[in-house]
Image: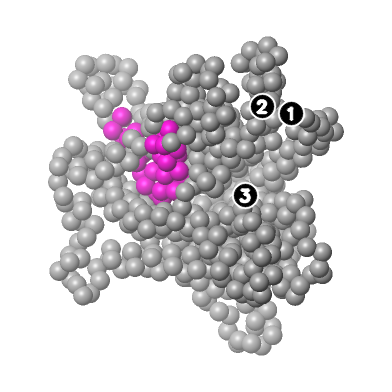
Amino acid sequence: MSEGRSRSFYVLSFLFGLYVLFLYGPTLTIVALSFQGPGGGMTFPMNGVSLHWFRNLWAGIGVPYVVDALLNSLKLGAFVTVLTVVISLMAGLAFRRSFRGQSVLFYTAIASLTLPSIIVSLGIALEFQIIDQSVKAVGDAYEIGAIQNSYQTAMGLMSSGLGAHLTWTLPFGVLIMFAIFNRFNSAYEEAAQDLGASSWQTFIHVLVPIIAPSLAGVFLFGFTLSWDEIARSSQAVGADNTLPLTLQGLTTTVTTPVIYALGTVTTGISFAVIIVTVSVVVSLQKRRSRHGSDAGKGLV
Amino acid sequence: MPLLSTTDKQAMTHYARWTSYWQAAPLAAVLLLFFVLPLVVTFIVSFWSYTGYSIEPDFIFDNYRDAFDRCIVALPDLCTTFRTYLSTLRFCLAVWLLTLVIGFIIAYYLTFEIRTTTIRLVLALVCTIPFWTSNVIRMISWVPLLGRNGLVNQALVGAAIIDQPLDWLLYSNFSVLLAFVHLNTVFMIVPIANSMSRIDRSLVEAARDAGATGWQILLHIIIPLSKTGIAIGSIFVITVVMGDFITIGIMGGQQIASAGKVIQTQIGALQFPIAAANAVVLLAVVLMIIATLIRYIDIRKEL
């Protein structure tokens, strides 16, 4: 493969460049427009440069609960991320051995990823409505004061909302774990066990360090997908709104660049998480190649 | 069916027999509670009746009759439901074709034209990063470009190509299609590139040595061997568009109907059983499409 570049390489490079422009161009325009002066409008030319719209955003932009929604999304995202990493890792370990029902479980996870979100979201909403109606019916039937007086709903950010997000993030986590364990060489574990390590020691000191970059990948998917999730949350978060849901509402009502400022902040947070994760993965790989350069290359 | 090699399993025979079960339990529990049960509940509720504020157990077919209101008797004229599905399917077809062509070209470029692994990884990351950012923001970001006073219209009017700004650039079928392609091409790129990376390069070399042209190699080697990736990508793109109500809502200015949007509207009106019936219909349509495509796939071989 040492021949010079063919014509198709240059044509395809040009097309790739166009695609990247198509991907990032629009986002760059709203980032630029969000730094406009106070008199700025929804489109170019830019009207001065300032942080006016960010201050306006932080002050609540006259729309209530924007900051609340941001905090809701951060909190939910944190829980979803931790649960996604833990549950995916456990499931990945489980799938290394064959067990009854593994095919059903795997294809259920794939189905959860594929089926339209509006259906999943509606289903969860209906499930919780039936729970609520049942609890209230029991409360009335047995005259339980606590239920009659104060029970509202079981639906909420941390119950139905959390579940809705997990049906979206977990399949990605499981697929990543599958991909890594399919290529995993269990000789390292055997070696550790032969040297007298317990199962737990093998797990913590051998397995986790080896698959750490993939766990970082699961972390990235867990947070970013939850942070931007909207279709499954739409019917399933109850009274509290997440940031994307609030944002969706604002698209029809707000006609100032403050919505671009909100877009810049949201995208900025996504990018921060992506950059941190990618740097962690890269530094893990570098450290590995420095310290364990003969791993897998010896006389094993 | 075992997922891993036998040696791998033998290495772990000292694990307790039930280990896999408790390790898989949390995943199973979440999927059961928040995916399987909700689907079952949706199916059951589609036969229920409702009052203004609650849903009541029942066994009626009114909700389905409502969903297909006079659809059969009105034929050959299409009723609202059929028209909505037809319009949604049309979007599906257009988005599928566009994402397939673009996704295939990008995947081909990454796999066969880029020679070093590092650059390939970086470029693949460049294509994937937007997927991890907000879809709503990515939709809104078309506004300054496509609006009546947006960059595109400014440029076209400035270059005297048109006298009046174009109205159909934003909040139209065009902008919906554009946003679908913008958001979902990544779902084609990743599985197709994954399939292509498994193609044995010596096949391509052998074909070239035997005198095959570039097009012949593409047509007889690369496309057939990328079939699985194409099928997986197609399933993703088509199911996303079939159930969509967010993109069509925002980019269509809340004016264009879709199968998903119908359900959303009915939920908004608290007509849960009718929404459930429509969800069951949508689910059936989506499952039929998946069943057609899934023949080309063994997902587990792709991981």
**Residue A73 in the image, given as x and y percentages of width and height:** 56, 38
Q: Residue at x 63, y 12 (%)?
A: A198
Q: Is residue A130 magenta?
A: yes
Name the residue carrying label 3: B133
What label sits on residue B103 in the rendered view?
none
Task: Tell me the CA gap for discs 2 and 3.
Answer: 39 Å
Give whichever of B90, A127 is nearer the camera.
Answer: B90
Task: Tell me the CA gap for discs 1 and 2.
Answer: 9 Å
Output the chain of dot 2. A
Q: Judge whether B181 appears above or below A212 on screen.
A: below
Give whichever of A109, A26 is nearer the camera.
Answer: A109
Same-chain check, marks 2 and 3: no
Amino acid type, residue under disc 2 in the picture: Ala
Name the residue carrying label 1: A300
Give whichever of A245, B280 is nearer the camera.
Answer: B280
Output the chain of dot 3. B
Q: Is residue B215 magenta?
A: no
Q: Judge whether A21 appears above or below B158 on screen.
A: above
Q: Residue at x 65, y 81 (%)?
A: B156
Amino acid type, residue under disc 3 in the picture: Thr
Name the residue carrying label 2: A187
Give whichever of A54, B108 is nearer the camera.
Answer: B108
Same-chain check, marks 3 and 1: no
Q: Quadrant of residue A173?
A: top right
Query: Badge 2: few (under 14), some or many (20 or more) residues near its Cα, within 10 Å?
Result: some
Q: Main secondary structure of the magenta part?
A: helix
Quadrant of the snapshot with the C terminus of chain A: top right
Output the chain of dot 1. A
